[in-house]
Image (cartoon, grey):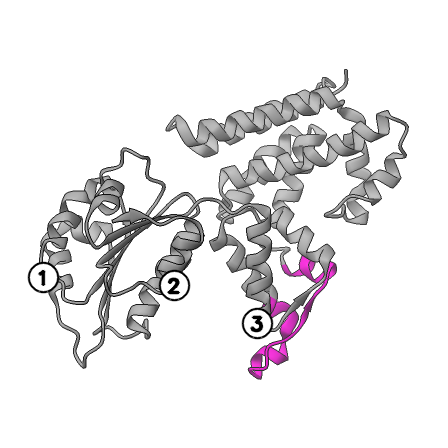
């Protein structure tokens, strides 16, 4: 069939037509992949707890038993209704198994396959893009606008409002993986709703303070502290806070982007201060805001870095992200090396000049 992109991909996952026999949902945004796959399966079977209409498989299941996928696709639904088989963590090594299974008589069973990022030469991707009654839906990282819309829509569904400064603060710190963002939003909804949630009424309001308090155990604080350590030249803390973030399942690229956002803020303040602006007023005007108790550290960082050196730090972070995506080397090692390199420059006083 084709590759469904953008709103077309969103729509096909929300309501997969009966003419579509199988969907491959893949990409670097694991949260969006899972969200769209779940939506497609839920549309087909309605009740995700109905074991007669839904079969969930891991890729290792079909690797150990290649015939199982075909057997599940051919199975009948007890009690009627459309069935779905949800295959997770698939890759090119499973292409032949999936291809053979799709040649069996599937009736009206919908196969939904989840995969990580697949390049243009991927055999699994080609199978779904070129096969009749098949479709492929790529899920790329959200930009700021799409993530803001996602947060707003999620909270509206929970009858929770959010103050603008709290929204900016969350978007700046939660990264762009929907799985991580949704997890933290669910915690915040419970945090601010309290008894209303227990009563089934929903409701609540997220302020900047409640966002900071409610997300305090989520790796969000460790990202703030990581940015402080890197920009402030605190080498002993760079590895510590990076490891803390990774333990909270923050991706290395997300951690580097959080540090990059700090350097973009520094670029703004240092650049305008060089033209005669007041550092304190510039810091106070930043959005998302720098929390009051963190402003002395930020001001100290602003004295360490010139605009040209900040640009070099951003180049290092950009190249490290490219390396994470293209070299095959462990992303945590690449990110750690880049962050320590920048932190060493700050500590040595090379941020100036």
In the foreground, 75 or 251:
75
Mark 2: which secondary structure?
A: helix
x%, y% of residue 30? 41, 49
- What's the residue at 47%, 54% (across, down)? 179
**Magenta-highlighted residues:** 189-214
Give the residue at mark 3: 158
In the foreground, 79 or 258:
79
Give the residue at mark 1: 105
Residue mark closest to the camera, 2 vs 3: 2
Residue 145 at least partly seen: yes
Other residues around mark 1 within 10 Å, as few (<14) / some (14–19) / many (≥20): few
Mark 3: which secondary structure?
A: loop
Mark 1–mark 2 distance (CA, rounded to whole Å): 24 Å
- What's the residue at 70%, 21% (across, down)? 309
Going from the N terminus, do you reach mark 1 or mark 2 first? 2
Going from the N terminus, do you reach mark 3 or mark 1 first? 1
Check the image and name the residue furthest to the bottom: 199
């Amino acid at each position: 069939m084709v590759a469904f992109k953008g709103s077309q991909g969103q729509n096909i996952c929300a309501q997969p037509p009966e003419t579509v026999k199988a969907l491959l949902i893949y990409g670097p945004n694991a949260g969006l992949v899972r969200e769209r796959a779940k939506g497609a399966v839920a549309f087909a079977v309605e009740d995700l707890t109905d074991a007669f209409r839904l079969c969930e498989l891991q890729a290792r299941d079909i690797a150990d038993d290649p015939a199982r996928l075909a057997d599940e696709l051919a199975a009948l639904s007890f009690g009627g209704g459309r069935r779905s088989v949800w295959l997770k963590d698939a890759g090119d090594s499973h292409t032949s198994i999936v291809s053979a299974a799709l040649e069996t008589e599937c009736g009206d069973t919908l196969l939904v396959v989840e995969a990580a990022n697949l390049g243009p030469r991927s055999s699994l991707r080609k199978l779904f893009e070129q096969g009749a009654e098949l479709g492929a839906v790529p899920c790329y990282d959200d930009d700021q606008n799409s993530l803001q819309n996602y947060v707003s829509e999620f909270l509206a569904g929970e009858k929770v409002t959010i103050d603008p400064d709290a929204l900016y603060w969350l978007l700046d710190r939660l990264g762009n993986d929907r799985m991580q963002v949704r997890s933290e939003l669910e915690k915040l909804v419970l945090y601010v709703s309290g008894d209303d949630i227990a009563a089934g009424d929903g409701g609540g309001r997220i302020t900047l303070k409640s966002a900071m308090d409610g997300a305090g155990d989520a790796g969000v604080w460790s990202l703030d502290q990581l940015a402080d350590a890197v920009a402030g030249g605190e080498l002993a803390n760079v590895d510590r806070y990076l490891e803390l973030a990774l333990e909270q399942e923050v991706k290395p690229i997300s951690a580097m982007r959080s540090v990059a956002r700090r350097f973009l803020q520094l670029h703004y303040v240092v650049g305008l201060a060089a033209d005669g602006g007041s550092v304190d007023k510039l810091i106070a005007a930043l959005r998302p805001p720098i929390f009051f108790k963190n402003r002395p550290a930020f001001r100290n960082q602003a004295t360490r870095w010139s605009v040209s050196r900040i640009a070099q730090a951003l180049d290092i972070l950009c190249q490290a992200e490219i390396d994470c995506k293209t070299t095959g080397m462990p992303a945590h090692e690449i990110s750690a090396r880049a962050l320590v390199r920048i932190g060493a420059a700050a500590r040595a006083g090379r941020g100036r000049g």
